[in-house]
Image (spheres, grey):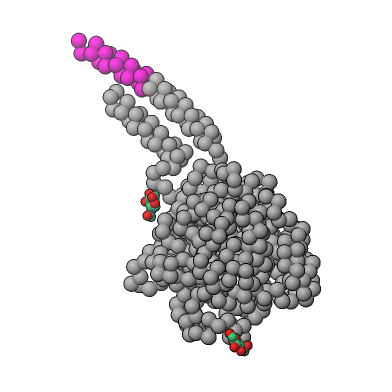
Amino acid sequence: MMMTRKIFMMIMMLILFITFNEVNGQTNDHRWDNLENIINSGIAEKAFPGAVLLVANKDGPIYSKAFGKFTYNDDEQRVMNTNTTKFDMASVTKVISTTSAVALLYQKDLISLHDSVVKYFPEFGVNGKSGITIENLLLHNSGLAPDPNPTYNTVEFNCSATEIYHPPQVFTCSNKIFNSWLNEKLAHNIGEKYVYSDLSMISLMYIIGQIVKKNMNLLQISNDDLRSDCVSQIGLNAPGHETCYFEAFVRKHVLEQLGMSNSGYIPNRYDVNIPPAWLDEVYHHDLIQGYVSDENCYAQGGISGHAGIFSTLPDVYNFMDELMFRRRENFIDSTTFSLFTSVKNTQQSSRALGWDTNAEGNGSCGSLSKKTFLHLGFSGTQVCGDPERNLFTIFLTNRVYPDKNVNKIGKYRNQVNSEVQAVYDKYYASDNSTGVIIAIVVILAIGLLCGVGVTIAGLYYKLRLEKRNEYAGLLK
Ligand SMILES: *[C@@H]1O[C@H](CO)[C@@H](O)[C@H](O)[C@H]1NC(C)=O
Ligand SMILES: *[C@@H]1O[C@H](CO)[C@@H](O)[C@H](O)[C@H]1NC(C)=O
Ligand SMILES: *[C@@H]1O[C@H](CO)[C@@H](O)[C@H](O)[C@H]1NC(C)=O
């Protein structure tokens, strides 16, 4: 009888343990194995030397992990770290800085989507550009070419710094760059087609800077907030000085506001937490490391609307968490959030305002919902926010090491997000109440089974007792 009871107790404990693990998944967690295999394959295939990934919902991060190292070298000591590795965010700058700044000024009625660029810079109206609006710039259908022409780092463009073999990162070319921007020509008719353009975001940087300069009291920006190197090298009222006001606004009203204390333009050149980008034999004549890899941004002094922000996983988490769940009163509100992250016109592109979306399905955010807002960075960075699942992912790599032309990351971006979607929907998405109900049902079933078991055991024991008594009777 004691044996039977012990066995029942053990079976019950085992079933409870399995149930608990299935519901809570705290121990022996193999749910993310497949995801980790995908990322490790990416490293093995040399799509990127290392990566950090974070998955989070409204309650906070549910998964975060670092993979690989800064380079593919066998003796590489520097490993990716979820807290400290600082990534060149490249075009994710377009959403962290420029799009957030436009959204904040939009909320304060300091900018309208229907404003023309010439409202701010009348000289920009040359070469047929007078009809370009803020909305065209945010949607990348302004008619501007993808890149400045000529690009600011070429000998042809003739920035004085470019003549030096290792060009210094300075603002001395800003006047020339600003004038070149004013005189850009159209590549297409305004509004005609989607052409992803760094010039769109460079344009917005100048506009934001001008608005900030005109509203310094209202926006609580003082001259002391401006970077002194920016102001002294460009000149306080010289062409392109808007750059310095733009940077101050982003620093104070986005980065500081969201506690992104390890993020900003122009990192420390010798910051050991920054992984290398590519070996550049044309412009820097060096392995790019510790400064922005985008050549136009570098020639602009390291501050621009299209690139230049460096950030860490915890800081990008703060940014995405605020956008998704809007916890602060003085940041982007839910109306503005929806406006800037909802696809505008699927006939033309999957773009929202500044943000891109997963509207076409199965793109770089994989099988996350079509409402997912996203942005990619050339350096190997990506953010995806799925408002249907209340779920977001941050996937940061230095995929451009050591050769920017090796582009194998697309497949991994898709697979990582699709796998996150599958794991999330299977283990997390059904809210806790479902899990609790399952647990209760299982426990009741166990109880019932045990009850039946004990009864059977009791009957069996009784039977044996009677048999034994019979024997005893016979022996008497
Ligand atoms: C990151 O920081 C958190 C909080 O300070 C700490 O608990 C965690 O161990 C750190 N992770 C790594 C990989 O250093
Ligand atoms: C380049 O700029 C310098 C001034 O910085 C000027 O003296 C020189 O003539 C320019 N060269 C060309 C080819 O425009
Ligand atoms: C999604 O795209 C990936 C490639 O990027 C492909 O392997 C996969 O089969 C696609 N999935 C669906 C459901 O179309």
- Identified at 56% across, 40% down, the residue is 430
**Magenta-span inclusion, residue 417:** no
**Magenta-span inclusion, residue 472:** yes
286 or 177, nearer to the observer: 177
> 351 above or below 175?
above
**Snapshot quadrant of residue 135:** bottom right
- Identified at 52% across, 50% down, the residue is 258
Q: In this view, does 141 lie to the left or right of 37?
A: right
> 17 above or below 233?
above
**Snapshot quadrant of residue 65:** bottom left
- Read off the magenta span: 457-476
Q: Residue furthest left?
A: 476
**Snapshot quadrant of residue 413:** bottom right
> 331 above or below 394?
above
> 377 above or below 339?
below
Q: Is residue 474 left or right of residue 431?
A: left
Quarter containing the C terminus: top left
